[in-house]
Amino acid sequence: MLNNRPLALVTGASSGIGYHLAKCCALNGFNLLVVANEPFIEESAKSLRALGVDVVAVQADLSTSEGVAKTYEAARGRPIAALLANAGRGLGKGFLDQDFSAARHVIDTNISGTLELIHRVGREMRALNGGRILITGSIAGFTPGTFQAVYNGTKAFVDSFAVALRHELSHSGISVTCLLPGLTDTLFFERADLMDTQMGQSENKADPAEVAQAGFDAMMKGESHIITGAANKVQAMLANVMPADLLAERHRAQAFPGSGIP
Ligand SMILES: NC(=O)c1ccc[n+]([C@@H]2O[C@H](COP(=O)([O-])OP(=O)(O)OC[C@H]3O[C@@H](n4cnc5c(N)ncnc54)[C@H](OP(=O)(O)O)[C@@H]3O)[C@@H](O)[C@H]2O)c1
């Protein structure tokens, strides 16, 4: 590292929301440790370096303990001032039609790997009496995800975990913030095999740069959570009062395979 800026660790920083979260960190005085599973993370790191900050890129599968350890060790003992645990993936189609190894990979990435990294970095932050943690959850966590059942389940877990952890750490100097986006225009839908659905074809997806900026601002203010976009705030309110069966049927219309083909 060439300078003394604080270090932000951003996972899933090769594209979409994570790339823009990393950019927000760079533009606001952080050096970066950026992580993703595919070699493309090197390209993203190159464009982040152009912002004048030090960037270390790590290629690691955060669904595994080895990937989490590789990521943590890449900090080489430098304190992590901010952890933006954003890496995640979706998976469309009916549960029984999914390849179970793909479903497990979603669970291992979105839940197990995310928690293992937060556990390691969180202990270090606690020893240093401070730090910021941003976790990318989703408003999908408020709705049983018919034809995206595993993904929505993982986000329900993460959304809940973030609030609980925040309260466990309320006197520790560590803030925990949950970013709760709705549909956002990223590679997520293609990777989740959702492009033939209404959800995948929706033209009302949010700009990932705006979603990331809102998440970054909430993290810096130490807020509990941020639901991005007015329509998503309404959707979240409705999810609190509508019966789960009704929510699950509404989700079917959005995620049913072929629902996006005219
Ligand atoms: N897009 C939406 O509508 C939406 C809405 C609500 C919440 N979210 C959440 O936002 C987060 C970011 O998703 P996105 O929409 O920005 O999608 P994206 O463009 O597909 O980005 C996902 C990022 O996570 C990384 N990643 C996935 N699995 C990984 C693994 N096992 N190990 C390491 N890195 C991994 C990807 O890297 P590789 O390409 O190298 O695998 C990529 O950098 C996710 O947690 C997602 O659940 C998205």
Image: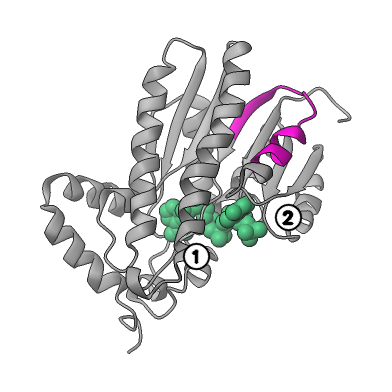
Classed neighbour count for the residue bearing mark 1: other residues with Cα under 10 Å, few (<14), some (14–19), many (≥20): few
Answer yes or no: is residue 120 visible.
yes
Residue pictured at 64% horizontal, 50% vertical: 13
The magenta stretch is: 68-83
Q: Is mark 2 within 8 Å of ligand 1?
A: yes
Classed neighbour count for the residue bearing mark 2: other residues with Cα under 10 Å, few (<14), some (14–19), many (≥20): many
Q: Where is residue 34 in the image (x, y as percent from the top left)?
A: 70, 44
Circle nearer the viewer, 1 or 2 = 1
Q: In this view, does 111 lie to the left or right of 57?
A: left
Please give the residue where the numbered disc 1 appears in the rendered image.
Answer: 102
Please give the residue where the numbered disc 2 appears in the rendered image.
Answer: 41
C-alpha span from label 1 to label 2:
22 Å
Residue pictured at 63% horizontal, 19% vertical: 124
Query: Could you say whether the residue bearing mark 2 is in a helix, strand or loop?
Result: helix
Look at the picture and state if 163 lies above or below 187.
above
Amino acid on which the number 2 mark rests in the picture: Ile
